[in-house]
Structures are given as C-alpha cells and as structure tokens.
Image (cartoon, helix red, strand yellow):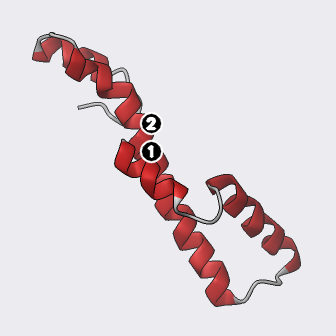
Amino acid sequence: MAVCLDALVKYPTSYKEDMEILAKDDIDHKLPINERNCIILRKGEKKILLYMIEMAEKISHLLAENMTVKDAKKIINNIPDLAI
C-alpha cells in the first residue's frame, strides 16, 4: 500500500483535479488533444492506484488474524469486486 501512496503523491494533480480538468474541457474544448489524452491516462493510473489502496485496506486484517481459509473466503466474498 505504501508503494501506491508514494506513487500517488508524485503526480502534480489529484484524481479529483483531473476529473475537474476533463469536465471543464468537455465544455470549453480548450485542451490540445495530446494534453487531454495525457490527463486521461494519468487519471486512469491514479484510479488503479486508488483501487489497490482501497483493496489493501479492506483485506489487510485478513493477514493479521489467525483464521481459516474458509472464514477468510466468507469475508472476501462480501467485498464487492473481490469475490472468489
């Protein structure tokens, strides 16, 4: 998780700021296409990092507890997008 957080802070803008920039450009169309595409790419990278952080937070307690695989699967199956 720390690796993802370290990567996020290296970006010049936040995920929310990227969304706002793109929303504004949807209205005024002032960004050059290459710059817009770079922001879309950057936003996608951040979305992946944020998802990885969220999942790490949700399942980190499974590693700390002494539980059976069966019990861990029950918990994982209740986490959206992580069911096995």
Residue 5 position in % (x across, y down):
45, 48
User: Label 1's element?
Assistant: helix
Q: Residue at label 1?
A: 51
Residue 30 position in % (x across, y down):
83, 84
Q: Residue at (62%, 88%) from the top-left corner?
A: 34
Tell me the kind of residue under disc 1.
Tyr
Q: Where 60 falls versus 71 (above or below)?
A: below
Left or right for 24, reference 43: right
Residue 76 position in % (x across, y down):
29, 24
Q: Residue at (21%, 12%) from the top-left corner?
A: 65
Residue 38 position in % (x across, y down):
58, 78
> 57 and 76: which one is in front?
57
Q: Quadrant of residue 62 in the image?
A: top left
Q: Residue at label 2?
A: 54
Q: Where 81 falls versus 37 (above or below)?
A: above
Kindly indicate whether the residue at mark 2 contacts the one at mark 1 (C-beta within 8 angstroms): yes
Checking the image for residue 41, the label placed there is none
User: Label 2's element?
Assistant: helix
